[in-house]
């Protein structure tokens, strides 16, 4: 006779099906075994404890597929089922409801507290062997669900077959399903308190179907790739990156280069081609636009649905491991764009995950982003914080990533970000600061650096929030470095002006030095500057064809001499004329033209000088490494300064002429007596310039100038930057 609990099983709305299904004591003399399988016409129990493997026929007690067998015995035994469907097909399996939980109380305690840093090894789908049975263990957090099931190609996507149990008050549901194996497709089917059915991809899935499909794929990422980067990892741990050159090549893998039929290259093909390019042109790192799984190509990866899943567009997880490993073997660091600021509203994603605002806030003034049409994470909820922190650690751990560049930090820090009055909720003190996000960042930076010394965390923070790169112990956010958006905006505005009017705006060039050492900055010319009608980098430059290239060469030389680490987006270094498009390859054919080829030669040489000369990188974050010579010559639109290293002989004088006029007999004061060797001239013919210069260098003269005892008399080429390396007078 069916009771209320059994009816809940039939209706697929039981929070603990293990209390009904499986093997149970009926009384002191009897046990009962129950199972539910809607596709079975007949089920037999096989006693695995007997040599003869005795069988018992089960009784079908409900037409939808609830079976039961009462046995007169006091003790439990190990058993399996033999199923027969209406077509006469048979198959056997151990009972999923005969296994104990895998997650421990301590696992759950740490997770609910927000401190289970490797929760990705517990939640999600994990192939494993339990009691000599091969299968897959599933666990998911859905505290407000009425019922949760695993559905997949192994159970005809039927949510009645593998109903999960909830573990106490943790909100975590789990089940071990025998025979389910790596490569099988699955989702979580969630019945909400309102009775609605949701089909959700696994938040912790390690691999996902290729878009437009979006089922999760059971995948064991352990032992898939044999790492060969031990030398790099050891060096990384011991490196003080603040005093080392960091020149980053920012790449979108889907549009860097494509095959002739416009198909993607895979991770392994990209590894070889990008590593060769980066080495040839002397970059130190690659930064990859998000490769976390995302449904829409046009989002560039910034609207993530699979935080633990490298996108299947370019291959399997081990292929991306190969990509990172190959970079490391070629002495190239890998920085990954990471997006904890928001997530899309796709039905299979994190939004309203169990029918309630679980990962996001319920109040749209807190939980929805007005510009991007996305949800905002609830950083104050422990389990959400745990999800994000463990995700960051996952990429650093399993994929050996060297740095995480955190997208849109400002949107997380301010409750009123991009909102009008009345559209946001103040914090408990009445302010606009998101206190939960602040604590999240502090915890994120503390934990990542604690586990992985030598990695970088980089903030894209577009305001003047204080202490972004200040240590957490000194009440900073704890990031390693920060994108210098102020320098980018001011300098691009300046260089885009007609040279005739630049003299009225010299402060746009010089203002960055007022705050240059307030944070550990990276100077960036990123993907954001060459999309949405902003024009490509070379097309921002004023003037005719020659002047556009001259201005761009000048601008890059100014960037590489200015204090701060460097980042260039792909295409910027070949002077691509078209705006970047994520739907096609870069215009590599431009390198058939001398102007573009020679601009790339300049970037190559700038990277070389930056990497090899300590005065250009060693004190990037210290005022000891910079000295103005003259920033007041607005009339001629010329600036000059010195860059210094830790040693006395590490000194470079950089001079920039932002007009198309040659400046003959241009005198500047210099810090020391000696020979000033011209080591870079962007007007050289090797860079497609007019070849005006200083014939290799000049000697200083005992003529006081700019408040210094010595000076040099130089020729300034038109629209050009010139570097002079100091050498003692012989």
Image (cartoon, helix red, strand yellow):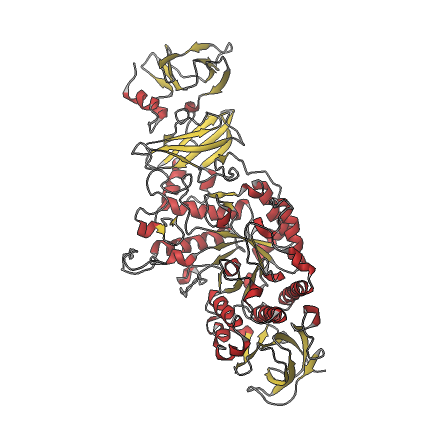
Q: Nearer the viewer, residue 486 or 143?
A: 486
Q: Nearer the viewer, residue 673 or 339?
A: 339
Which corner quadrant holds the N terminus? top left
* Image height of 306 relative to 28, above or below: below
Q: Residue furthest bottom?
A: 703
Residue 663 falls left or right of residue 147: right
Looking at the image, which residue is at 33% across and 47% down? Answer: 361
Q: Position of residue 306 (x, y in %)?
A: 47, 42
Q: Position of residue 368 (x, y in %)?
A: 35, 50
Q: Position of residue 539 (x, y in %)?
A: 56, 65
Q: Position of residue 253 (x, y in %)?
A: 57, 50
The picture quadrant where one finds residue 678 is: bottom right
Q: Is residue 301 visible?
A: no
Residue 240 falls left or right of residue 347: right
* Image height of 34 relative to 256, above or below: above
Which corner quadrant holds the C terminus? bottom right
């Amino acid at each position: 006779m069916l009771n209320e609990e059994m009816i809940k099983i039939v209706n697929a709305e039981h929070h603990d099906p293990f209390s009904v299904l499986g093997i149970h004591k009926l009384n002191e003399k009897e046990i009962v075994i129950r199972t539910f399988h809607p596709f079975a016409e007949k089920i037999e129990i096989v006693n695995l404890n007997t040599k003869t493997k005795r069988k018992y026929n089960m009784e079908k007690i409900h037409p939808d597929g609830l079976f039961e067998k009462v046995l007169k015995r006091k003790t439990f035994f190990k058993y399996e089922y033999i199923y027969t469907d209406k077509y006469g097909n048979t198959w056997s399996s151990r009972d999923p409801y005969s296994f104990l939980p895998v997650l421990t109380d301590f696992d759950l305690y740490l997770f609910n507290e927000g401190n289970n840093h490797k929760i990705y090894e517990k939640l999600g789908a994990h192939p494993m062997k339990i009691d000599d049975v091969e299968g897959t263990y599933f666990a998911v957090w859905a505290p407000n669900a009425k019922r949760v099931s695993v559905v997949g190609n192994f159970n005809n996507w039927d949510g009645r077959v593998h109903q999960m149990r909830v573990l106490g008050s943790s909100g975590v549901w789990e089940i071990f399903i025998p025979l389910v194996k790596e490569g099988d497709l699955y989702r979580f089917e969630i019945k909400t308190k309102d009775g609605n059915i949701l089909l959700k991809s696994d938040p912790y899935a390690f691999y996902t179907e290729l878009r437009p499909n979006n089922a999760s794929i059971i995948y064991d990422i352990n032992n898939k790739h044999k790492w060969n980067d031990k030398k790099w990892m050891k060096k990384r741990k011991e490196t003080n990156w603040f005093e080392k050159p960091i020149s980053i090549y920012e790449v979108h893998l889907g549009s860097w280069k494509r095959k002739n039929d416009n198909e993607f290259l895979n991770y392994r093909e990209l590894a070889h081609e990008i590593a060769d390019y980066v080495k040839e042109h002397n970059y130190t790192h690659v930064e990859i636009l998000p490769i976390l799984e995302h449904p829409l190509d046009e989002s560039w990866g910034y609207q993530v649905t699979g935080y633990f899943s490298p996108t299947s567009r370019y291959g399997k997880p081990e292929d991306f491991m190969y990509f990172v490993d190959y970079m490391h073997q070629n002495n190239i660091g890998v920085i990954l764009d990471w997006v904890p600021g928001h997530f899309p509203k796709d039905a299979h994603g994190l939004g309203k995950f169990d029918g309630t605002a679980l990962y996001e806030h319920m109040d749209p003034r807190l939980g929805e982003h007005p510009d991007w049409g996305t949800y905002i994470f609830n950083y104050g909820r422990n389990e959400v914080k745990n999800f994000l922190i463990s995700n960051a650690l996952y990429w650093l751990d399993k994929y050996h990533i060297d740095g995480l560049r955190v997208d849109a930090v400002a949107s997380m820090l301010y409750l009123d970000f991009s909102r009008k009055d009345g559209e946001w909720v103040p914090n408990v003190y009445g302010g606009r600061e998101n206190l939960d996000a602040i604590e999240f960042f502090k915890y994120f930076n503390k934990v990542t650096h604690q586990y992985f010394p030598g990695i970088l965390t980089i903030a894209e923070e577009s305001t003047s929030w204080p202490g972004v790169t200040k240590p957490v112990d000194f009440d900073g956010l704890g990031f390693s470095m920060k994108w210098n958006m102020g320098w980018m905006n001011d300098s691009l505005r300046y260089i885009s002006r007609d040279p005739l009017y630049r003299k009225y705006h010299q402060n746009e060039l010089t203002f960055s030095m007022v705050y240059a050492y307030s944070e550990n900055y990276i100077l960036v010319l990123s993907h954001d500057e060459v999309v949405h009608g902003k024009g490509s980098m070379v097309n921002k430059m004023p003037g005719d064809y020659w002047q556009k290239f001259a201005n761009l060469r000048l601008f890059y030389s100014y960037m590489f001499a200015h204090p701060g680490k460097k980042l260039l987006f792909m295409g910027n270094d070949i002077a691509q004329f078209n705006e970047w498009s994520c739907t096609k390859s870069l215009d590599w054919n431009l390198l058939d033209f001398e102007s573009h080829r020679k601009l790339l030669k300049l970037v190559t040489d700038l990277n070389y000088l930056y990497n090899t000369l300590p005065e250009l990188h060693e004190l990037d974050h210290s005022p000891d490494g910079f000295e103005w010579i003259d920033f007041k010559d607005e009339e001629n639109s010329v600036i000059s300064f010195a860059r210094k290293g830790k040693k006395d002989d590490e000194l470079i004088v950089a001079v920039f002429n932002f007009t198309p006029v040659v400046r003959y007999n241009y005198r500047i004061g210099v810090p020391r007596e000696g020979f000033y060797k011209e080591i870079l001239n962007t007007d050289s013919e090797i860079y497609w310039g007019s070849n005006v210069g200083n014939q290799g260098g000049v000697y200083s003269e005992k003529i006081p100038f700019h408040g210094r005892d010595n000076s040099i008399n130089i020729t300034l080429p038109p629209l050009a930057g010139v570097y002079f390396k100091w050498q003692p007078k012989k």
